[in-house]
Image: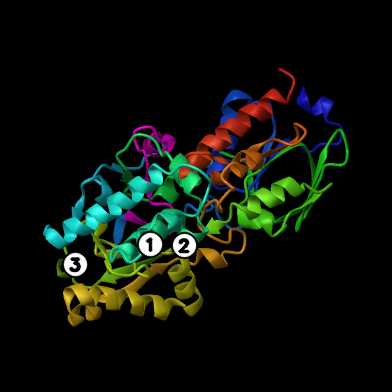
Amino acid sequence: MPGETSKGANEDVVIVGAGAAGIAAARRLQSIRPDLSILLLEAGDRLGGRAWTVGLPGVADVGLDLGCGWLHGARTNAWTEVAGEVGLTVDRTPAPWNGGRRLERDDAEVRASQEAVSAYFERLENHEGDDTDMARALEPGNPRNGQIRAIGTYITGAELERSSVVDYTRYDPGAGPDWRVREGYGTAISRYGEPVPARLGVEVRRIDHRHAGRVGIETNKGTLNTRTVLVTVSTNVLAAEKIAFDPPLPKKIEAAARLPLGLADKLFLRLANPEALPADTHMLGSTSRGATGTYQLRAFGAPVVEAYFAGDLAHDLERAGRDAAFAFAADELAAHFGANIRKELSVAAISAWAAAPYIGGSYSYAEPGASDLRGVLAAPHEGRIFFAGEACSRSRYSTAHGAYETGIAAADLIVGSFPRP
């Protein structure tokens, strides 16, 4: 048995972080090596990590996703099948970028804007040479640059000047379209993790790998020993060295620091009169500036507006607080629907991912020149310390299914490190 080759180990595998990657890895290990003892450690008070669904009072079957919400590349996204397995409903209404309903008029001005945005992203795709930042592809003085900047922050969670063009060109979420889980993406991921032995509220502070036969895991609730450890925490947590490695792993810390988390926050607004806004329709707050929100009106027909802020705007609003975020969104909606819409709105839920103590942001982006560091971050260390998470994915970073895939890959590597049963 594996335990016999690992003197002093309490567990065969300890997984640090109960997000999409950690849960996927644990379930994979359970399915292919049920003889191994597995323990999932989570510093927070719930499963799911950056996948987090909360309820909408009075609407029983609609979840509000404060984190990931779209099943990108849904036909090949593993979470699509998982959602069905755990008894949830996959809604196949087209996303706005897949032909869903948009509020914008179909006129010459809108078409010119769409052409400018398309031309910008085509320039990115055709980029050759050094890995520069995404702002270099802007045309100086182009009046559409504000809208392009806004869309760029939604993609990376950071301003164009900080984001790698090579990393952008490598992004490939898989075959579309993009769908949603009616009861919540976070609900699907956390429910999938329920069969895994887990301890919540356990903050890992040090990973001691000095000894050949075991890895020590020091936590706020004591110390345990394991044969192998899988680390799935966010790059911001790693870069801040909230988990100390002994001996240190400087290449991992450097990779994490150059693959930081961007920020995307959500504000859900309850509608007193649902008929005040069109159902399941998308709009951009402003087409002339980068600091603007994007809005999904009445998703699933529910009486709610999902406001999405990213990059520096998200940081500013998160620091300013709930009332400031509400005022910003209400102003942008009032500019489209008139001042009376303000009276229809109230806050249903709001996220603050930058302030989340064990996460520190939303999804990873690569600084210029850092895209290859995703592979450095993902590489196992001495066959005992493994890594997974969306930031480890070369082409599906920033997604929950990218995290899933890295978790599966890490689990398979971990199995290979044990003798056969």
Segment tinted magenta in the rendering: 62-84
**Residue 374 on the magenta span:** no
Choose mark 3 or mark 2, whichever is in front: 2
Mark toward the start of the polypeptide (3 vs 1): 1
Instruction: Work out whether residue 227 or residue 1 is closer to the camera in this orientation and state it.
Output: 227
**Residue in view at x 46 percent, y 42 percent:** 128
Crowding at mark 3 (Cα within 10 Å: few <14, some 14-19, many 20+): some
Q: Position of residue 297 (x, y in %)?
A: 24, 62
The residue singled out by tag 1 in the image is 149
Instruction: Work out whether residue 347 or residue 393 is closer to the camera in this orientation and state it.
Output: 393
Label 1 near label 2: C-beta < 8 Å?
yes
Q: Amino acid at mark 1?
A: Arg
Mark identifier at residue 159:
2
**Residue 82 on the magenta span:** yes
Choose mark 3 or mark 1, whichever is in front: 1
The residue singled out by tag 3 in the image is 274
- Tell me the CA gap for discs 3 and 2: 34 Å
**Is 192 placed left or right of 56 in the picture?**
right
